[in-house]
Amino acid sequence: MQDFLQYRDRIVKISALLAAALVFAFAQGGRMDIAFGLALGGAWSITRFWLRAHHLKKSAEGKDMGKSVRYTLGGSFGLYALTGVVLSISFVVKGINPWAALAGLFIANAVMVAYEGLGHVKVAFSGHSHHGER
């Protein structure tokens, strides 16, 4: 479980740094609408990832399988509903680029894919088994 928590924390930190860098870059370029969209979508992406990890951790700790499944499904429904709210806000509020918000929603996902991909590339070049430490 400790490895899972470390993985979660790494993804959150890297995602936050990436989102902040993108927001800063677009803000410096004078595209505040894109910066606000990325900030909104990126913040929700990171929060959603953290909450999903929390639900998985709680589900794994549960002794009652039915309760764990209901907890996880209820949490997933709530996350999807709130994602819809975030997108709705980005389309309604002037000054927020909705397409940037949509792109921001995938920041944590992109970081996970890149993190895992780079881990496998590192293992391929090191000649070690991919089941060991990164």
Image (cartoon, rainbow, N blue to C red):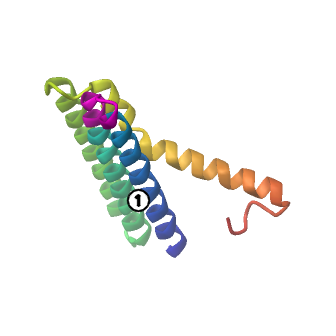
130 w.r.t. 73: above or below = below
Residue 18 position within the rendered picture, expressed as x and y whole percent measured from the top left: 44, 47
Q: At 76% across and 58% down in the image, what residue appears?
A: 123
Type of the residue with mark 1: Ala
Q: Is residue 27 left or right of residue 118?
A: left
**Mark 1 sits on what residue?**
53
**Quadrant that contains the C terminus:** bottom right
Magenta stretch: residue 30 in it?
A: yes
Q: To which quarter of the image does residue 52 belong? A: bottom left
Front-lying residue, 68 or 12: 12
54 w.r.t. 42: above or below = below
Q: At 24% across and 39% down in the image, what residue appears?
A: 81
Residue 48 position within the rendered picture, expressed as x and y whole percent measured from the top left: 33, 49
Q: At 36% across and 57% down in the image, what residue appears?
A: 50
Mark count: 1
Front-lying residue, 105 or 75: 105
Front-lying residue, 3 or 18: 18
33 w.r.t. 38: above or below = above
Magenta stretch: residue 14 in it?
A: no
Q: Looking at this rendering, what residue extends furthest in the left direction?
A: 93
Front-lying residue, 69 or 93: 93
Predominant SS along the magenta part: helix
Q: Which residues are magenta?
A: 27-37
Residue 65 position within the rendered picture, expressed as x and y whole percent measured from the top left: 40, 64
As helix, strand or loop, the secondary structure at mark 1 comes to: helix
Q: Is residue 79 left or right of residue 132?
A: left
